[in-house]
Image (tube, rainbow, N blue to C red):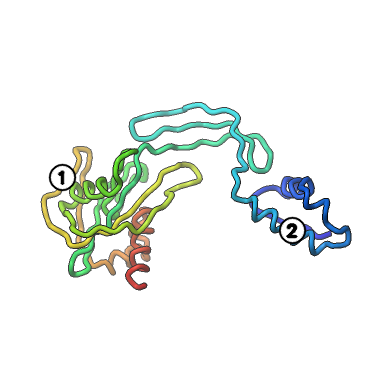
C-alpha cells in the first residue's frame, strides 16, 4: 500500500491514529482506494484538535506589559520538549486615518527591539477588558491629534502566533477633525501626511515593515477596490 505524507505530525503518529480507529477495521481488505479516502476524511475531521500536551509550566519573566512562560510539553509528534510563550497584557490597536483627499497619516518612531526607525500607522495598546474602539480613538488622538466621526473595523490578526498570543485589531477612521497630538512621555514621534497610494507603495517597497501596518494597508486597499 502507498503512503500519505503529512507535514503537521509524524507519519508514525498519523498511521497509529488511523489504524486504531474503528472505521479502519470495517474496511474491505482489498479496498486500498477506500482506505485512502477514509484516511483523508479522518485527518480532516481531527486536524484542528489541539495535539499538544502540557505537562508543566513556570513563569520565567513578568512586567506590566508582557510575561513569558515556559512549558514542558509533548509535541504533536509524541516527543518531549519545551515551548516558550509570550503573553501580551494589552491588545494591539491600529488606525488607518483617511482624510477627504484620500491622504493618510503615518507615525515614525525608533523601535527599541529592532534598533532602527519604523514608519507605521497609528498604533497602541488596549488593556484587557477595555473597549477596543475607545482605545483606538485614544491612540489616534494621542499620536496625530486627529479625531474622527466615522469608524470601521477592517482587520483582526494574530501578530506572531508561533511565540506569542498578541492579538491586534485595526480600524479605518474617516471624516477627520484636526487637533493637538498628546503623545506619551516615553514617545518621540513624527507624523507624516501622504496619499494613501504612497503608503501602499511604501509597503510594496519594504519601507513599511511593521506587520500590523502592512496587513492593514493591504487589507484597506483590497476593501476599497471591492
**Which label's residue is closer to the chain start, 2 or 1?**
2
Q: Secondary structure at mark 1?
A: loop
Q: Does 135 appear above or below 170? A: above
Q: Quadrant of the N terminus?
A: bottom right
Classify 10 Å Cα crowding around label 1: few (below 14), some (14-19), many (20 and above): some
82 left or right, relative to 199: right
Q: Position of residue 43 (x, y in %)?
A: 68, 54
For image coordinates 36% across by 45% down, the residue present is: 114
For image coordinates 83% across by 54% down, the residue present is: 26
For image coordinates 28% across by 45% down, the residue present is: 124
Q: Quadrant of the C terminus?
A: bottom left
184 left or right, relative to 30: left
Residue nearest the viewer, comparing 212 with 119: 212
Disc 2/disc 1 C-alpha distance (Å): 61 Å
Q: Does 79 appear above or below 198? A: above
Q: Position of residue 88 (x, y in %)?
A: 39, 38
Mark carried by residue 111? none
Classify 10 Å Cα crowding around label 2: few (below 14), some (14-19), many (20 and above): some
Q: Quadrant of residue 223?
A: bottom left
Q: Are marks 2 and 1 in contact (CB under 8 Å)?
A: no
For image coordinates 19% across by 46% down, the residue present is: 142
Q: Which residue is mark 1?
A: 182
Q: Which residue is mark 2?
A: 38
Amino acid at each position: 500500500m502507498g503512503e500519505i505524507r503529512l507535514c503537521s505530525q509524524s507519519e508514525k503518529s498519523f498511521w497509529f491514529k488511523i489504524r486504531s480507529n474503528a472505521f479502519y477495521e470495517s474496511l474491505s481488505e482489498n479496498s486500498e482506494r477506500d482506505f485512502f479516502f477514509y484516511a483523508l476524511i479522518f485527518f480532516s475531521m481531527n486536524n484542528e484538535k489541539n495535539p499538544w500536551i502540557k505537562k508543566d509550566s513556570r513563569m520565567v519573566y513578568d512586567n506590566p506589559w508582557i510575561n513569558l512562560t515556559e512549558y514542558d510539553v509533548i509535541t504533536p509528534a509524541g516527543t518531549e520538549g519545551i515551548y516558550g510563550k509570550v503573553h501580551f497584557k494589552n491588545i494591539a490597536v491600529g488606525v488607518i486615518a483617511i482624510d477627504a483627499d484620500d491622504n493618510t497619516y503615518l507615525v515614525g518612531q525608533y523601535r527599541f527591539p529592532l534598533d532602527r526607525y519604523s514608519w507605521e500607522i497609528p498604533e497602541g495598546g488596549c488593556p484587557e477588558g477595555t473597549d477596543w474602539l475607545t482605545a483606538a480613538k485614544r491612540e489616534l488622538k494621542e499620536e496625530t491629534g486627529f479625531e474622527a466621526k466615522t469608524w470601521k473595523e477592517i482587520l483582526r490578526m494574530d501578530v506572531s502566533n508561533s511565540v506569542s498570543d498578541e492579538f491586534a485589531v485595526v480600524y479605518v477612521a474617516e471624516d477627520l477633525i484636526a487637533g493637538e497630538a498628546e503623545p506619551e512621555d516615553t514617545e518621540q514621534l513624527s507624523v507624516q501626511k501622504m496619499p494613501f497610494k504612497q503608503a501602499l507603495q511604501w509597503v510594496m517597497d519594504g519601507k513599511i515593515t511593521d506587520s500590523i501596518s502592512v496587513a492593514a494597508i493591504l487589507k484597506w486597499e483590497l476593501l476599497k477596490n471591492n
